[in-house]
Each structure stands twice: as structure tokens, then as C-alpha cells.
Image (cartoon, grey):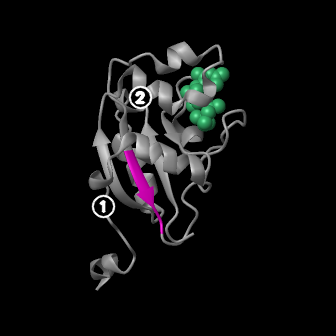
Amino acid sequence: MADEQTFIAIKPDGVQRGLVGPIISRFENRGFKLVALKLTSPGQELLEKHYADLATKPFFKGLVSSAPSAPWSGRVRTPSRPAVSSWVLPTPLTPPPGTIRGDYAIEVGRNVCHGSDSVENAKKEIALWFTPSEVLKWTSAQAKWVYE
Ligand code: UDP
Ligand code: MG
């Protein structure tokens, strides 16, 4: 669990609404460690790969069409909690107040952020969105100085 990592993307609607800071803060406030982040306009090819498992869905075309504003994307890890499962609920469930989507999402197509749904998919998504050199080699031992 100590090294579990997830991939979070703030989607174009979240960027347009100025929610980058508030959403990052929610992860930091809960003790997640940010090890890489970028502001990027991913383009259709990358989005098609990212959402490849949804290729047959009727909403796929709209989902992967290049958005006018850039999704911000970041990756976090935590030393003490499961990074993947502890923050996001699957889309069919109505997110309760207090969760990121519960507090900010307007509807399913405007739900402000993405989070990996499994450790395996997190690894794939991290490799898709980041090169290894863009990612900080963070360990809890290396971060100790922050608290000294
Ligand atoms: N989505 C949509 N309409 C739907 C279902 C999903 O527009 O009926 C979009 C929505 O942005 C969602 C994304 O497709 O976040 C990926 O769908 P998935 O079921 O994987 O949901 P998530 O993993 O984001 O909870
Ligand atoms: Mg999903």
C-alpha cells in the first residue's frame, strides 16, 4: 500500500471552472503526495487510448473529441492510504456530498475529474500521460526533512 499510486486528471470542465487548485488541495489536505503534474491539451489520440475501454459506448465520440481547454493532470501517491480506491466512486453511483464529484459535478458528462479505477489501470494511465523522468522519485524516507 505504501507505494500505491493513482492518476488524477482534472477534466476541461474542471479547468474552465477554476477548480484545479481546490481539487489538488483536497488530495493534499488528505495526505496524498503529488509526484508529477502537468497542464496539457492531450488531443484525441491520447484520449482515445486513455478511454479505450469505452470505445463502444455512445458517448465515446464526445468524450475523446479534443476539448477547447486543457485538462490538467497530475499524479499522487500516499504512504498511508490506498491511493486508487479512497477517493472516487464508480460513475453509476450518485456521488454523495463531501466527495469531489458530489461537491462539484453537474452531471455525468461534466464531472470535473478522472481517477484511476484500479492499481493496474493507474499504472497504464501514468505511463500514458507521463514519461518516467517527469515523475518525482518520492519516498516517505526522502520526505522526512519536511517535518523535521
Ligand atoms: N461518461 C459520459 N456519459 C456516460 C458515462 C460516462 O459522458 O453515460 C463520461 C464521464 O465523463 C465519465 C467518463 O465518461 O467520467 C468515463 O466513464 P466511466 O464509466 O469510466 O466513469 P468514471 O471512471 O469516470 O467514473
Ligand atoms: Mg472509468
Q: Nearer the viewer, residue 44 or 29?
A: 44
Query: Does the stretch in magenta take in 13?
Result: no
* Circle 1 residues within 10 Å: few <14, some 14–19, many ≥20: few
How far across and how far down the image is residue 5, in percent?
49, 58
Q: Which residues are magenta?
A: 74-78
Q: Main secondary structure of the magenta part?
A: strand
Residue tagged 2: 46
How far across and how far down the image is residue 23, in percent?
42, 46
Secondary structure of the residue carrying tag 1 is loop
Q: Residue at x 58, y 54 (%)?
A: 119
Residue extending farthest right = 93
The circle on residue 136 is 1
| Tag 1: amino acid | Leu
Q: In this view of the protein, can residue 26 be seen by the observer?
A: yes
How far across and how far down the image is residue 63, in percent?
51, 20
Q: Quadrant of residue 29?
A: bottom left
Q: In this view of the protein, can residue 106 be seen by the observer?
A: no
